[in-house]
């Protein structure tokens, strides 16, 4: 689960170097913040030698990089998960976080993500990175494209250190783990077909998800770190 923990940690504490298509549409201000933030990160923040850590090839020209359609990050709280059953509708289970992930597109592929949040009443690009997550979201967008009428949504369950996606057009209860290096939460993997062409049901994941979240909360309580509610 190290890759999940690393990526989710980056989602909360976005990597800032020192000196999914989603139907959710942000207002103009977050999009403008993403555009200006990308230009600033590439010109002033990320040294050329570090670009490989952000999904770019060594020596690759980044001047034509742009931000693509964003993903509004959703989450499932421990309280909501506790009351969930196999019959729960996923749309009623997830809640938006207000965080937007904008893919950085270059050469027709997503390289990394610019993250935009509301800061002191305005919108600001607070970080760039998470290249592995950008790659998985790119695959989901290609498999379930907006042009085909699909609106996949990105879901993070922080206490389980895992990402999921749901496609409302495929039914009310699909919730599928994102797979990093071929493996997702609870050992889930794509058994047949193209990657992300098959989806999982909430009923398949509910018990292990509840167990992982409660174990995390119990562990934090015993270490004095709070309950994570």
Image: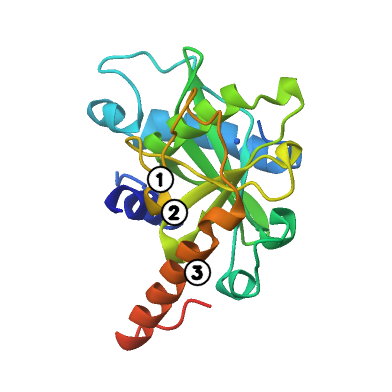
Q: Residue at coordinates 45% horizontally, 75% vertically from top-left?
A: 214
Furthest residue in direction left, as rendered: 49
Q: Nearer the viewer, mark 2 or mark 3?
A: 3
Measured Cα–Cα span from mark 1 to mark 3: 16 Å
> Do the numbered discs 1 and 2 sit on residues whose CB atoms are within 8 Å?
yes
Query: Percent from the top left, x then y, of residue 110?
Result: 48, 25
Q: Nearer the viewer, residue 110 or 175?
A: 175
Residue at disc 1, secondary structure:
loop
Can you tell which mark lies on residue 184? 1
Which of the two discs, 1 and 3, labels the residue nearer the N terminus? 1
**Vertical relation: 80 (above or below) 122:** below
Provide residue 115's location: percent of width, then percent of height: 52, 44
Q: Residue at x 65, y 62 (%)?
A: 86
Discs 1, 3 touching: Cβ within 8 Å? no
Query: Which residue position holds label 2?
Result: 162
Residue 216 horizontal side relative to residue 152, left or right: left
Crowding around mark 1 (Cα neighbors within 10 Å: few <14, some 14 to 19, many 20+) is many
Give residue 50's quadrant in the image.
top left
- Residue designated by label 3: 210
Q: Secondary structure at mark 2?
A: strand
Direction from residue 171 to residue 60 in the image, left or right: left
**Which-is-in-front pick, marks 1 and 2?**
1
Mark 1 or mark 2: name the one nearer the start of the chain.
Answer: 2
Q: How far separated are the C-alphas under marks 2 and 3?
A: 12 Å
* Label 3 neighbour load within 10 Å: few <14, some 14-19, many 20+: some
> Residue 3 vs residue 13: left or right?
left
């Amino acid at each position: 689960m190290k890759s999940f923990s690393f990526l989710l940690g980056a989602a909360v504490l976005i990597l800032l170097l020192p000196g999914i298509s989603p139907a959710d549409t942000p207002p103009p201000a977050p999009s403008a913040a993403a555009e200006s933030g990308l230009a600033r990160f590439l010109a002033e923040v990320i040294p050329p030698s570090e670009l490989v850590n952000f999904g770019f090839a060594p020596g690759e020209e980044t001047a034509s990089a742009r931000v693509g359609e964003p993903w509004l990050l959703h989450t499932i709280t421990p309280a909501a998960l506790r009351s969930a059953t196999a019959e729960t509708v996923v749309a009623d289970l997830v809640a938006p976080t207000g965080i937007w992930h904008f893919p950085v597109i270059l050469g027709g592929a997503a390289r990394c993500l610019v993250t935009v949040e509301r800061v002191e009443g305005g919108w600001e690009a607070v970080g760039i990175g998470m290249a592995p997550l950008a790659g998985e979201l790119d695959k989901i967008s290609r498999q379930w494209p907006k042009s085909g009428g699909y609106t996949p949504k990105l879901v993070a369950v922080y206490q389980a250190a895992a990402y999921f996606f749901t496609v409302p057009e495929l039914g009310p209860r699909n919730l599928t783990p994102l797979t990093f290096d071929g493996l997702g939460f609870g050992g889930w993997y794509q058994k047949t077909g193209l990657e992300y062409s098959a989806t999982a049901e909430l009923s398949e994941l509910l018990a292990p998800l509840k167990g992982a979240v409660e174990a995390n909360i119990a562990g934090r309580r015993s270490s004095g770190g709070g309950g994570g509610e």
